[in-house]
Image (cartoon, grey):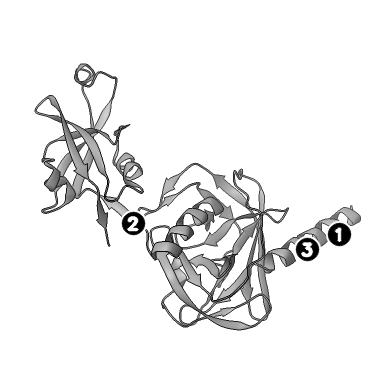
């Protein structure tokens, strides 16, 4: 038993040491800094809520030296920020997706003069979800792990050292969650290229409604719910397309719409594109072509 515990302890220490080669310290806000991860050459990812400045951000590298970074872009909806550091190499690492509840994860951040490590488990592993700000996260991963000061932005690794994502306490008011590696890859690439994430919108207020059984004949398919338009933003994409108060939206871009979350899923990555909307208007089916706008706020 003692030998097994010693081997476990040594293995965890080695995993933390390897993960520490990716972990950086960031002084992006007053008093309490945060951690970040060398995600690629010249690229550092961290939790957006910990970054309060755009330029001249001190970053403590794994070798202990301090360099200055600038903000490449941020997506507050997913609590992800990307910093750019000139000529900074990054170790290669293997990503880990498909985590299950109960799996062990290690959180590794950086606090001068060394790493800041914690161990815990995945307490909830679910499917895609929307943050309270509307960001799309590919997998809901609640963590039963110590979230200490400076822990937000720490790299999360499994027991084999594969990178599962980063830790953040900025997306929920209870347990910390992971921003999965697949989400980081998607958002970081767009932030590095464009400096922002383009969020599509139609400029309408919606509410789910149940559809009577007779609607199935009108639509040519069984559908139990749609969304009714309660408000139309003046000058917005919906008004320009001819969508009206009282229209019941049942399909958009070829996808059945039964809830407001369905709308967000369709609009992802569709800014500037035309989508065909199918609505029920006065009991009859109507088709409207709408150009997706971009929400700046």
10 Å neighbourhood of mark 1: few (<14), some, or many (≥20)? few
Using the numbered discs, state the Cα–Cα distance from disc 3 to disc 2 in whole angstroms: 40 Å
Name the residue: 10% across, 53% down.
Answer: 234
Q: Residue at x 56, y 69 (%)?
A: 36
Q: CB under 8 Å between callouts 1 and 3?
A: no
What is the quadrant of residue 145 in the picture?
bottom right
Q: Is residue 117 above or below residue 135?
A: below
Q: Which residue position holds label 2?
A: 198
The C terminus, quarter of image? bottom left
**Residue 208 location in percent, x, y?**
24, 37
Q: Along the polypeptide, which appears first: circle 1 or circle 3? A: 1
Of tags 2 and 1, the one toward the viewer is 2
Sooner in the amino-acid sequence: mark 3 or mark 2 = 3
Q: Secondary structure at mark 1?
A: helix
Q: Quadrant of residue 215?
A: top left
Q: Which residue is mark 3?
A: 14
Question: Vertically, is 77 above or below 96?
Answer: below
How far is the residue under mark 2 from the one under mark 1? Answer: 50 Å
Q: Residue at x 46, y 82 (%)?
A: 30
Q: Which residue is mark 1?
A: 6
Q: What is the x, y in percent for residue 4?
A: 87, 53
Residue contact between numbered discs 2 and 1, judged by CB atoms under 8 Å: no
The local secondary structure at tag 2 comes to loop
Figure label count = 3
Is the residue 228 above or below the residue 94 in the image? above
Of residue 190 and residue 297, the one placed in the foreground of this image is 190
Residue 259: quarter of image: top left
Mark 2, other Cα within 10 Å: few <14 / some 14–19 / many ≥20: some
Q: Is residue 6 left or right of residue 66?
A: right
Seen at 37% across and 63% down, the residue is 196
Q: Earlier in the sequence, mark 2 or mark 1?
A: 1
Where disc 3 sits, the SS reads: helix
């Amino acid at each position: 038993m003692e030998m097994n515990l010693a081997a476990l302890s040594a293995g965890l220490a080695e995993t933390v040491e390897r993960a520490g080669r990716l972990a950086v310290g960031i002084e992006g806000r007053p008093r309490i800094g945060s951690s970040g991860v060398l995600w690629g050459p010249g690229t550092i990812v961290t939790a957006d809520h910990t970054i309060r400045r755009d330029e001249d951000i001190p970053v403590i590298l794994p070798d202990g030296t301090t360099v200055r970074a600038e903000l490449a872009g941020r997506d507050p909806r997913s609590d992800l920020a990307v910093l750019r550091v000139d000529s900074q190499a990054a170790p290669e690492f293997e990503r880990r997706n498909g985590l299950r509840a109960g799996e062990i994860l290690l959180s590794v951040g950086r606090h001068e003069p060394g790493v800041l490590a914690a161990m815990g488990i995945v307490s909830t592993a679910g499917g895609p979800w929307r943050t309270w700000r509307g960001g799309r996260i590919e997998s809901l991963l609640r963590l039963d792990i110590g979230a200490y000061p400076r822990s937000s932005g720490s790299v999360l690794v499994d027991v084999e050292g594969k990178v599962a994502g980063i830790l953040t306490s900025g997306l929920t008011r209870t347990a910390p969650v992971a921003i999965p590696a697949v989400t980081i890859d998607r958002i970081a690439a767009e932030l590095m290229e464009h400096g922002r994430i383009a969020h599509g919108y139609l400029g309408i207020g919606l509410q789910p409604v149940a559809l009577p059984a007779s609607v199935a004949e009108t639509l040519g398919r069984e559908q139990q719910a749609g969304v009714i338009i309660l408000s139309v933003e003046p000058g917005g994409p919906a008004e320009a397309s001819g969508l009206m108060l009282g229209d019941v939206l049942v399909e958009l871009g070829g996808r059945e719409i039964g809830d407001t979350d369905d709308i967000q899923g369709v609009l992802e990555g569709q800014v500037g594109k035309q989508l065909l909307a199918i609505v029920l208007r006065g009991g009859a089916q109507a088709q409207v072509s709408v150009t997706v706008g971009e929400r700046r706020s």
